[in-house]
């Protein structure tokens, strides 16, 4: 029951709530034999509802592996992974699929369907959820696109949108079904400074309005200020809280 004092930066007010995501001694390996790669090493981490977590660290350190694990995109091989109160060690494919309905993803590349217009791309996300059947999904998708500032572009195909606009469609698609958890893997990497900032502000606004928990991998030190906590991944391990604090200080200074 007691969390092993692994959370170094408690956020005000979080103590009353249970973590929405809790990892205890999670390990993950890729491949087998001599090629076997120990990608995540003994990770323990608690994330609380409504927190914005930024995950950073060198290339190849395990950030994407960790992020996909936090969203139930991979099965937990070793240790305990609890998301939304459900233990995922030993979970079935069906359980993982059910869990994923609560999770929105924004990837570096937008992954939009090029043959569908913006509205249909966003609508696709609703079609995965039984609860939207019988509702006006076009209307819901359109209103989400309006929220991200694309009300005038709902009929546009991705090819006719700018990089920043496409990423906003991807955000609308990730948020339209009101996920409890939103994951972003370098969501601003392909964007210029201004549209990057717009995208981040949007995510933050949605987080506040909907109490969404956001976990984002990024190297962008311009957006550190939105984070409640910054975690540093190095060679598959979480850096100590001292190292984490020193890193944050250095980043803020630059
Ligand atoms: N599907 C995979 N198969 C084998 N090795 C992988 C796979 N995905 C990632 N890895 C390895 O695991 C390590 C962590 O990768 P990744 O999580 O993608 O790092 P990051 O996102 O921090 O750049 C790297 O050494 C990478 O080569
Ligand atoms: Mg990565």
Image: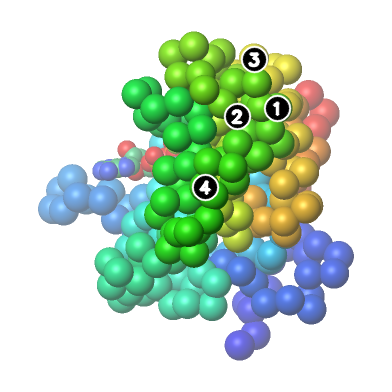
Q: Quadrant of the C terminus?
A: top right
| Mark 3 neighbour density, 10 Å: few (under 14) some (14–19) many (20 or more) | few
What residue is shown with label 4?
A: 137
Q: Is mark 1 within 8 Å of ligand 2?
A: no
Q: Which of the two residues, 198 or 23, is positioned nearer the viewer here?
A: 198
What residue is shown with label 1?
A: 149
Snapshot quadrant of residue 26? bottom left
Q: Determine the residue positioned at 54% across, 49% down.
A: 136
Identify the mark nearer the N-term, 3 or 2. Answer: 2
Front disc: 4 or 1:
4
* CA–CA distance in space, label 4 to label 2: 18 Å
Specify the quarter for ligand 2: top left
Q: Which of the two residues, 92 or 121, is positioned nearer the viewer here?
A: 121
Q: Secondary structure at mark 1?
A: loop
* CA–CA distance in space, label 2 to label 1: 8 Å
How many labels, in total? 4
Front disc: 2 or 1:
1
């Amino acid at each position: 029951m007691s969390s092993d004092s692994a959370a170094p930066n408690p956020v005000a007010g979080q103590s009353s709530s249970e973590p929405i995501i809790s990892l205890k001694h999670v390990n993950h390996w890729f491949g087998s034999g001599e090629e076997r790669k120990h990608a995540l090493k003994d990770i323990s981490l608690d994330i609380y509802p409504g927190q914005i977590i930024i995950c950073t660290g060198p290339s190849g350190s395990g950030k994407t592996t960790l992020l996909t694990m936090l969203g139930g995109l991979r099965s937990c091989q070793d240790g305990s992974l609890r998301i939304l109160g459900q233990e995922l060690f030993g979970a079935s494919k069906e359980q993982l699929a059910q869990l994923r309905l609560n999770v929105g993803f924004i990837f570096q590349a937008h992954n939009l369907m090029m043959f569908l217009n913006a509205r249909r791309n966003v609508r696709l996300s609703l079609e995965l959820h039984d609860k939207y059947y019988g509702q006006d999904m076009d209307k819901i998708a359109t209103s989400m696109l309006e929220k991200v500032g694309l009300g005038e572009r709902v009929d546009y195909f991705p090819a006719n949108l700018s990089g920043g606009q496409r990423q906003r469609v991807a955000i609308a698609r990730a948020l339209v079904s009101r996920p409890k958890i939103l994951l972003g893997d370098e969501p601003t990497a392909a964007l210029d400074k201004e549209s990057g900032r717009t995208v981040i502000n949007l995510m933050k606004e949605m987080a506040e309005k909907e109490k969404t928990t956001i976990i984002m991998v990024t190297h962008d030190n311009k957006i550190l200020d939105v984070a409640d906590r910054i975690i540093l991944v190095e060679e598959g391990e979480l850096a100590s809280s001292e190292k984490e604090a020193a890193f944050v200080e250095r980043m803020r200074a630059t």
